[in-house]
């Protein structure tokens, strides 16, 4: 960041009084610009014994499978954002149940919040960000073609817990992938 969103003045990276980390501070008006993680919200949509996955039409990970999810918008709740993203990516209507996985991805400043959800009907189709949308049972999940680790971890936890009939809430923190 080079310029203040409030007044257009130059900003400098410095530790403001009373803070403990560097922030972008406007040298003219004094506004402190906080850069915080982005929240990704989505659903794990279920119909009977199957889950709905979307094949991505966009980067990152174009062509790979994922759960319907995306950036939460200002002015919406996390559950409303997850429901909206499911409608946008899979043209699917869902009833959002409970928060299921909370995945911290600190190396890219993201937090992924995925809700368990029930599909309301089988009227779904690819949205503009999806190439294909399909229901999968556990045996047919394309495990090697999943787009994101948060999706893999969510699906594995879901299928494990579904066998017991008891679902918890999971918090996971992902380290960077070593190359």
Image: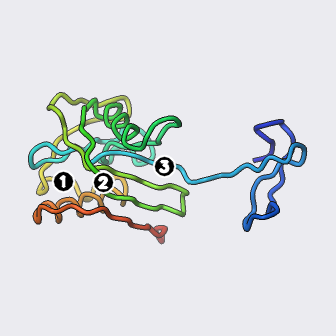
Q: Nearer the viewer, residue 78 or 23?
A: 78
In the rendered view, would you say 103 is above or below 96? Answer: below
Q: Nearer the viewer, residue 61 or 156?
A: 156
The mark nearer the N terminus, 3 or 2, is 3
Label 3 or label 2, whichever lies nearer to me, is: 3
The mark nearer the N terminus, 2 or 1, is 1
Residue with the mark numbered 1? 141
The mark nearer the N terminus, 3 or 1, is 3
Local secondary structure at mark 3: strand
Residue 73, position in %: x, y? 50, 37
Local secondary structure at mark 2: loop
Residue 82 occupies quadrant: top left
- Mark 2 near mark 1, Cβ–Cβ under 8 Å? yes
What is the CA distance from the residue labelled 3 to the residue labelled 1?
26 Å
Q: Which residue is at 24% across, 63% downward?
A: 157
Residue 109, position in %: x, y? 55, 57
Label 3 or label 1, whichever lies nearer to me, is: 3
Residue with the mark numbered 2? 146
Q: Alpha-carbon neighbours of circle 3 within 10 Å: few (<14), some, or many (≥20)?
A: some
Local secondary structure at mark 1: loop
Q: Alpha-carbon neighbours of circle 1 within 10 Å: few (<14), some, or many (≥20)?
A: some
Q: Nearer the viewer, residue 69 or 139?
A: 69
What is the CA distance from the residue labelled 2 to the residue labelled 1?
9 Å
What is the CA distance from the residue labelled 3 to the residue labelled 2?
20 Å
Residue with the mark numbered 3? 39
Residue 50, position in %: x, y? 13, 47
Q: How is the image coloured?
A: rainbow
- Mark 3 near mark 2, Cβ–Cβ under 8 Å? no
Q: Which residue is at 54% across, 58% downward?
A: 108
Residue 146 occupies quadrant: bottom left
């Amino acid at each position: 960041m080079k310029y203040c969103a409030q007044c257009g003045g130059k900003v400098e990276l410095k530790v403001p009084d009373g803070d403990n980390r560097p922030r972008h501070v406007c040298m003219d008006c004094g506004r402190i610009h906080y850069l915080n993680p982005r929240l990704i919200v989505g659903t794990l949509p279920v119909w009977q014994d199957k889950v709905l996955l979307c094949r991505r039409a966009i980067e990152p990970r174009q062509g790979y499978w994922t759960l319907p999810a995306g950036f939460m918008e200002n002015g919406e709740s996390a559950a409303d954002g997850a429901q909206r993203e499911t409608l946008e990516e899979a043209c699917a209507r869902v009833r959002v149940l409970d928060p299921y996985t909370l995945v911290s991805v600190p190396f890219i400043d993201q937090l992924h919040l995925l809700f368990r959800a029930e599909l309301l009907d089988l009227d779904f189709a690819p949205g503009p960000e999806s190439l294909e949308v399909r229901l999968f049972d556990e045996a047919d999940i394309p495990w090697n073609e999943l787009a994101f680790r948060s999706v893999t971890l969510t699906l594995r936890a879901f299928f494990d817990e579904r066998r017991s009939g008891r679902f918890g809430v999971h918090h996971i923190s992902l380290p960077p992938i070593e190359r």
